[in-house]
Amino acid sequence: MKKHGTLFFLVVFTAIMALMVGVYWQEIERGVDANDTLALGGTKMKYRETLKVLLWRGYIPDSVHKKIQQDLNINIEVTTFDSDAEFKKHLNLHGNDDKNPSDPEIPFDIIMPTDYMVLSLAEKGLIEKINYDEIPNYRNIAMNLRRQDFARSLFDYSVPYIYGSLGIGYNYWEIGNIVFNWKMLFEPKSNTSLKGLISISPDARISLGIALLAMGKSPNSRDEDDVKQAGEYLKEAIAKYDIRMMNSGMGDMLASQDLLLTMAWSGEIAEALNEDPDASGVNSLAAKIVRFSLPDEGALVYFDALAIPNTSTKQALALKYINSLLDPFISADVTNHSYFATVNEQAEPYVKTEIVNGPAYFLPTSSGPVFIRQYLGDDEKIYDTVWRDVTRFYFEHLRKQNYYKTERSQHQLWKF
């Protein structure tokens, strides 16, 4: 009887412990906050910290963050953004007119600024210098990228993570010949009507920079007259060809033939070319009709980097997070998900062949000029001022177009 009682006790005790462990791991999977506690044998204990990260939308899949959470025993709270303007709002920055008399309290432990924004944040003293001794996976970053003059300035205050080129995406069936220059965006020579089927970026530095390149100037010009001329050049093209402004989705719109010519990021075109065919068969056509080229006047190369705000109280943990993202398998997962190229050369064997051999990894050859957007300090205001004029013109032109379409529809209805 005593033996059976002992056995019964052991069975019950084992079942209770198994249940408690099960509950514990359920809480882990749910991703509890750093302040959450779990009762184990009547004792409450804190078991993980929360790292707050601000990232470009669509880069890093949830599966990667779940793995890093398990590896580092932390909770990751992700906020995403779609543009530099939205990025600034998340950081409590208010454009170049704001001198930041008091440093803003940046509510994140990791942020993902674009190249020229890194230099802006560093100049304002808002991000920390990177301690590479705490990032052993830094050695995985391709040496040829580390040695590039246009990238070297980024490494002090950030860790470049994603890179690519800004080029021209176009519909081969409709445009025909390969588009070799930026001027084709603003002065297209085609037998096909391109009115309403061209798009440019809504970002001031990108679109004004490309207009400058088309005019034979530097996209980082500090000459106010140059930038004003670029603004007028854009306004003329907008009026003549009903050019649209788009921040994303250009690859898919080329595939569906809702666009024929556009500024485009290399990774976005790669994604459009490799998407699975949908029910309508639109994406199955992409590989046949969508093309990408790097123009002769000069290619714009970009880097999206990882940086640590100086207000973060979890900088050691932030460095571990960056080191995890530079693991070859994790970097490959990011690229296989986003179709944007990774700086991690050790990851390339695990990246899909069609991505490595496609537009995502297109970089300019040494024969042509290569540009990266530079931070221009107070001269950034020149671009902001001119761009406000361009966007006012754009929306007024759009309003007139919509008014004309509405009036025409009403007139046709009346005739009917």
Image (cartoon, helix red, strand yellow):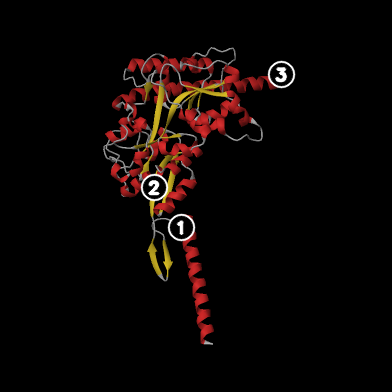
**Amino acid type, mark 2:** Lys
Check the image and report above or below for 351 versus 210: below
Say left or right for 193 vs 106: right
Q: Position of residue 36 (x, y in %)?
A: 41, 59
Visible residue check, residue 59: no
The Cα atoms of the two marked residues, 1 and 2, are separated by 17 Å
Check the image and report above or below for 297 versus 271: above
Check the image and report above or below for 237 versus 72: above
Name the residue beneath numbered marker 2.
52
Sequence-wise, the earlier of marks 1 and 3 is 1
Q: Position of residue 172 (x, y in %)?
A: 57, 20
Which mark, by number, is residue 28?
A: 1
User: Do the numbered discs 1 and 2 sit on residues whose CB atoms are within 8 Å?
Assistant: no
Sequence-wise, the earlier of marks 1 and 2 is 1
Q: Position of residue 188 (x, y in %)?
A: 52, 14
Check the image and report above or below for 277 versus 2: above
Mark 3: give few (<14), some (14-19) or many (20+) Cα within 10 Å: few
Q: Nearer the viewer, residue 246 or 288?
A: 288
User: Do the numbered discs 2 and 3 sit on residues whose CB atoms are within 8 Å?
Assistant: no
Which quadrant would residue 311 be assigned to in this image?
top left
Q: Nearer the viewer, residue 90 or 60?
A: 60
State which mark lies toward you, 1 or 2: 1
Q: Nearer the viewer, residue 14 or 110?
A: 14
Visible residue check, residue 249: yes
At mark 1, the secondary structure is helix
At mark 3, the secondary structure is helix
Which mark, by number, is residue 137?
A: none
Which mark, by number, is residue 415?
A: 3
State which mark lies toward you, 2 or 3: 2
